[in-house]
Image (cartoon, rainbow, N blue to C red):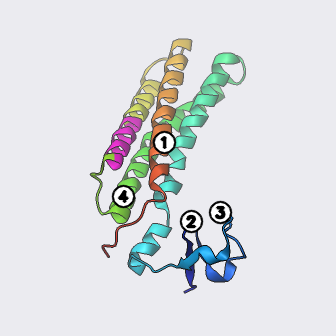
Amino acid sequence: MAKLVRCKNCGFIIEESKLGEVCPACGVPKSAFEELTREVSEKRRKLMELNMHPIILHLPLGFTMFILILTLLNLIFPTFYFDTIYTTITVLSFTLPFTAVLALLTGIFDANLRFKTITTPHLKKKLIFGSLFLVDGIILLSITYFLPVSQTLLIIILVLTIIAELFGGINGMLGGSLLCSKIPDRG
C-alpha cells in the first residue's frame, strides 16, 4: 500500500510519490505535508471508497432533470413528437421511485459506515429531504399513470419535478458539507 501524506493547511491527501513541490489543492510548500495514519479499518475504508451513495444518487436526480426538460419540451412544442416524449416521461416517472429508494438505502448504509449513526442533525435532514424526494417521485408516478394526459397534467408534472430538484439540491448541499468531515476512529 502506498504511503499517504496530508496537507496540514487544507487537508488534501495524496500518495507521497505523486506529491510535487507544492500542494496541488492550496499551493503551500511540500514541507506542509505530514504522514497520514489510517484511522479506520482496511475493510471499512474499502467499503467507503466504493462511493456507492454518491454514484447511485445520480440516477434519480438525472431522471428528474430529464422529466423536467421533456415536460418543458412538450409544453413549449406540443406538436413535436408529443406521444413519444410523454411515453419517455412516463417510463422515467416509473423508474424514479425505485432509484430514489436505492439512493436512500445506500445513503443510510454509507452514513452508518462513515459516521456510525444516522441520527446527527445533518443526516436527519438528509433523511427527511430524501424521503420527501421519494414521496414526490411516488406522486409523480401515480399521476403520470392514472390521470389523463393534458396541459394541466404537464404543468403538475413540471411543478413536481421542480420540487424534486429542490429537494435533491438541498440534499446535495447537505451531503457536500459532509464530504470532508473527519471520520471517527471506531474500527
- Taking the image as shown, residue 23 lies to the left or right of residue 3, namely right
Q: Nearer the viewer, mark 3 or mark 2?
A: 2
Q: CA distance from mark 1 to mark 3?
A: 39 Å
Q: CA distance from mark 1 to mark 2?
A: 44 Å
| Horizontal and vertical percent position of residue 159 | 50, 22
- In this orientation, which residue lies closer to the viewer: 127 or 133? 127
- Quadrant where the N terminus sits is bottom right
Q: Nearer the viewer, mark 4 or mark 2?
A: 2
- In this orientation, which residue lies closer to the viewer: 8 or 47? 8
Count residues near mark 4 (Cα–Cα under 10 Å), then give few for <14, some for 14-19, many for 20+: some
Q: CA distance from mark 1 to mark 4?
A: 24 Å
Q: Which residue is mark 4?
A: 111
Mark 1 vs 4, N-terminal side:
1
Could you tell me which residue is drawn at 54 percent across and 36 percent down?
Answer: 64
- Taking the image as shown, residue 11 lies to the left or right of residue 181, namely right
Q: Amino acid at mark 4?
A: Ala
- Look at the numbered discs 1 and 4 and tell me whether their residues touch, using CB distance below 8 Å: no
Q: Secondary structure at mark 3?
A: loop
Q: Which residue is mark 1?
A: 95
- Look at the numbered discs 4 and 2 and tell me whether their residues touch, using CB distance below 8 Å: no
Mark 3 vs 2, N-terminal side:
2
Could you tell me which residue is drawn at 30 percent across and 54 percent down?
Answer: 118
Count residues near mark 1 (Cα–Cα under 10 Å), then give few for <14, some for 14-19, many for 20+: some
Residue 133 belongs to magenta span:
yes
Residue 12 marker: none
Residues in magenta? 122-134
Q: CA distance from mark 3 to mark 2?
A: 10 Å
- Look at the numbered discs 3 and 2 and tell me whether their residues touch, using CB distance below 8 Å: no
Q: Which residue is mark 3?
A: 25
Mark 3 vs 4, N-terminal side:
3
Q: Which residue is mark 2?
A: 9
